[in-house]
Amino acid sequence: MQEQCLWTQGAQEPAPVTETLDGALRTRVCVVGGGITGLSTALHLSASGTEVCVLEAGDIPTGGSGRNVGLVNAGLWVPPDDIVKALGEADGERANRVLGGAPAKVFALIERHGIQCHPTRTGTLHLGHNAKGCEELARRRDQLVARGAPVELIEGEACERLTGTRRIRAALCDRRAGTLNPAEYTRGLARAAQTQGARLFTHSPVTGIQREGDGWRLSTPRGSVVADRVVLATNAYAQDSWNQARQHFFAGYYMQVASRPLSGAAADAILPERQGAWDTRTVLSSIRRDAAGRLVLGSLGRGEGRPRAYLKRWADRIAGHYFPELGPVEWECTWSGRVAFTPDHTLRLFEPLPGIVAACGYNGRGVTTGTVVGEGFAEYLSRGDDSLLPLPLKSYRAIRGRGLWSAAYESGFSLYHLGQCLRLVN
């Protein structure tokens, strides 16, 4: 089992041809971060005729945009009523509406720009692994149906046929959603942004930012950019002291393990319609198949640096629990990505300084959230209209004890996975 991200292996969508910033540049908008949020911002800005450049510290993609599960989810992590409770009636329902329609925007971009990312539009499945989990799914179903969402709670034999396992008692199917290869989707956004005129600079980390006239100067190791407006689209990878977005989330990780391509009746029975799925465990497990038929399992927590035997045992435990008919599985690769968490599990959109906008705290919903936030930022920066954003821009207090939050989450994830490996928890 190699430590390598599956999504860049044999990718159909080619990596964008970019350059390293060398010298001075003047532009209308500078986007920091070449992930889904930054590239969606650049694409929509350039399509509207606004001059824009992107500064990315690594390749495209490097961070979580190319390393996530690839679920094209509708909504936020928490149920819609809980979102309203956390954010208030107006902002909560706005987030429910905008993010509920986010999958359609992702698929529209894929079709419009011919992005080769193996998309599926058969929905996602939230899997009830026990009685309490099924009760939670019924509660979510009722809240979503009340808002007109095309969701269905599937039970009994129909659930077994759709999931391929007898261990799941019920599954909440959301037909708005789907799956894709996240690295290919990110590359496709980059290609589309370049086609519209955006300039992309890779291996050009921002080392500092300072006020210059009515705009901002961003420094890199070999150059600088002066821009009227700046977008901080670094999300979970905001670590530098100059980046104020880092104060508004605490970092976590998500690990994944992928098998070699599977075939045969037992394999074909697993998620036959290719929905992406995740269960209602305290520390969830995600399950999906890729275009080549691999079984891809994931969970909260950091896999990097852990013994391969530990990761293999965890993956064997999950696969054996849900799909015992498979028998022994050969695991091909493993990788992890960072997640930006917030205490209330909702995102933050704000202006840390005049002329600078920032986004963070996607809580594991980066594909759809990043796409619509990018479109919303573009509309706000070019026309002063923030209505396309999931939330209005507002001020937030910095999260205190971010390191303690991160350590507590990671410790809890690790203990739970250890319990799974030792068969202390199902």
Image: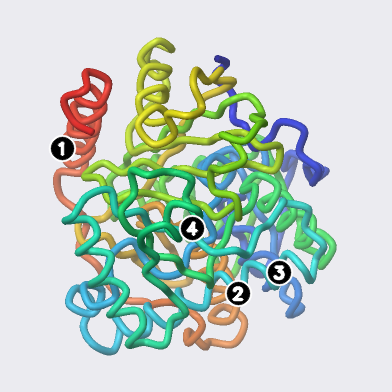
Q: Which residue is mark 4?
A: 232
Characterize the local packing of mark 1: few (<14), some (14-19) or many (20 or more) Cα atoms within 10 angstroms.
few
State whether residue 213 is above or below residue 9: below
Q: Amino acid at mark 1?
A: Leu
**What label does residue 109 carry, if any?**
3
User: In terms of depth relative to the viewer, which is nearer, 56 or 290?
Assistant: 290
Give how far across and how far down residue 401 sits, in percent.
15, 44
Q: Of label 4 and label 1, which has the lower sequence position?
A: 4
| Residue at left offset 35%, top offset 14% | 310
> Which mark is in front, 4 or 2?
2
Question: Residue 257 vs residue 92: left or right?
Answer: right
> Which mark is in front, 4 or 1?
1
Dot 1: element: helix
Q: Amino acid at mark 4?
A: Leu
Give how far across and how far down residue 18 sits, in percent.
79, 43
Q: Of label 4 and label 3, which has the lower sequence position?
A: 3
**What label does residue 104 carry, if any?**
2
Callout 4–callout 1 Cβ contact below 8 Å: no
Question: Residue 252 vs residue 48: left or right?
Answer: left
State whether residue 175 is above or below residue 224: below
Quadrant in which the N terminus is drawn: top right
Task: Say if residue 351 shows up in the picture.
Answer: no
User: CA gap, disc 4 to disc 3?
Assistant: 22 Å
Callout 2–callout 3 Cβ contact below 8 Å: no
Quadrant in which the C terminus is drawn: top left
